[in-house]
């Protein structure tokens, strides 16, 4: 597609459920929209969730990758232009709206509106997190870590052999407890959870023996896979999530107290007029596929209203 000199109504950055939903709605509302995705296929975190997504009432019995395939079909049927393997590295204000610079493009793309739908990455151990922060396109889970340390939930946990191993789990949320249970059910010799506080649902907490949970401060020596002086074969890190929006720092977007992009609840607009943030990058609602899809619709309708009002 020849996009030189063209000014899009909206560029959607990120091809997870939120970004795809927004792009499809904008296209079907009659506006020119393009979706940019850093990975080689759309789907976002769905691609890393190999389990059945039984929480998605609209698509029962499907795994995360199957949901991702349906997102790609929706884009195709709505004739939305998509650029894959196209990570954005800079946004700049322009007379007509914004310039968007991304790898793999001959020059910046021009757009009247921007939708940030780049999702989140798993927080890692402090040293590895600093390494990931230096490159905003790098997942914390892919940052340099000693062997035997796994960050965040997903397919890499499923692929791991747990049989006969001593496992330490760091974190006190749902992911920490669910994955501790998974390791126990898949043959781990022992599993111990280290959490500064317990935030997980009680349905998960009850499945873990109380003497396997250590609350309070703890010391991690990553290179030795050692916690509080005890060695482990595997350390699983579940420190929650942070938004992947370092490329947008130049716009001075307001953040929430937890570091996510702050938005108007009714429109998903950020503190910068014409820039919207949806899905997990904004943590506007409980994060899941269905709320992400709804977020995409919210932004699309807000952009429609803005354009039709003459902005």
Image: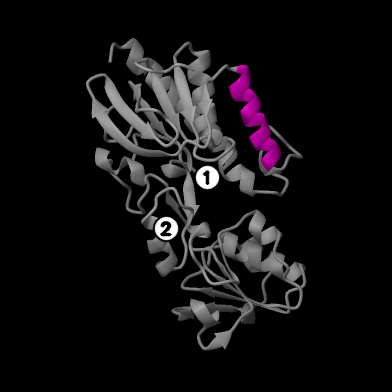
Residue 132: mark: 2
Residue 202 location (% of width, % of height) = 61, 63
Residue 129 location (% of width, % of height) = 42, 62
**Magenta stretch contains residue 159:** no
Residue 81 location (% of width, % of height) = 52, 21
Report which residue position mark 1 lands on.
Answer: 287
Residue 96 location (% of width, % of height) = 26, 19
Q: Quadrant of residue 306?
A: top left
> How many numbered discs sit on the rendered protein?
2
Q: Nearer the viewer, residue 296 or 146?
A: 146
- Is any part of residue 283 visible from this angle? no
Q: Residues within 10 Å of mark 2 (few under 14, many from 20)?
A: many
Q: Which residues are magenta?
A: 65-77
In the picture, measured across the screen, residue 150 lies left or right of residue 115, that is right
**Magenta stretch contains residue 73:** yes
Q: Residue at x 46, y 52 (%)?
A: 138
Q: Describe the element under mark 2 as helix, strand or loop.
A: helix
Vertical order, 266 against 126 (above or below): above
Q: Dominant secondary structure of the magenta stretch?
A: helix
Marks 2 & 1, CB-CB < 8 Å contact: no
Q: Residue furthest left?
A: 95
Q: Residue at x 59, y 38 (%)?
A: 43
Label whose residue precedes the other's in the sequence (2 or 1): 2
**Quadrant holding the C terminus:** top left
Q: Residues within 10 Å of mark 1 (few under 14, many from 20)?
A: few
- Is any part of residue 45 visible from this angle? yes
Label 2 to label 1: alpha-carbon separation: 23 Å
Q: Nearer the viewer, residue 146 or 149?
A: 146
């Amino acid at each position: 597609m020849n996009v030189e000199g063209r000014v899009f109504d909206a560029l959607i950055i990120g091809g997870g459920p939120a970004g795809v939903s927004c792009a499809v709605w904008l296209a079907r509302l009659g506006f020119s929209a393009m979706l940019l995705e850093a990975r080689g296929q759309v789907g976002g975190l769905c691609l890393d969730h190999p389990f059945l997504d039984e929480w998605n009432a609209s698509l029962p019995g499907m795994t995360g990758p199957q949901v991702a395939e349906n997102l790609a079909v929706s884009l195709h049927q709505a004739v939305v232009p998509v650029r894959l393997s196209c990570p954005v590295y800079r946004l700049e204000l322009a007379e007509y709206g914004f310039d968007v610079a991304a790898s793999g493009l001959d020059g910046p793309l021009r757009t009247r509106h921007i939708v940030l739908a780049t999702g989140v990455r798993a927080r890692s151990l402090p040293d590895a997190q600093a390494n990931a922060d230096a490159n905003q396109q790098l997942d914390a889970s892919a940052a340099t870590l000693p062997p035997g340390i796994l960050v965040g939930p997903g397919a890499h946990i499923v692929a791991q052999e747990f049989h006969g191993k001593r496992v330490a789990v760091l974190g006190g949320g749902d992911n920490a407890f669910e994955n501790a249970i998974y390791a126990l059910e898949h043959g781990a010799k022992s599993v111990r959870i280290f959490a500064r506080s317990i935030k997980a649902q009680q349905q998960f907490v009850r499945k873990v023996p109380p003497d396997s949970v250590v609350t309070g401060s703890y010391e991690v020596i990553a290179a030795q896979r050692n916690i509080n002086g005890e060695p482990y074969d595997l350390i699983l890190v579940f420190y929650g999530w942070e938004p992947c929006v370092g490329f947008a720092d130049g716009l001075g977007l307001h953040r929430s107290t937890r570091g996510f992009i702050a938005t108007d609840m009714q429109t998903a607009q950020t503190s910068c007029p014409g820039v919207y943030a949806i899905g997990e990058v904004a943590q506007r609602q409980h994060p899941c596929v269905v709320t992400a899809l709804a977020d995409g619709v919210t932004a699309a309708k807000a952009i429609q209203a803005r354009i039709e009002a003459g902005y």
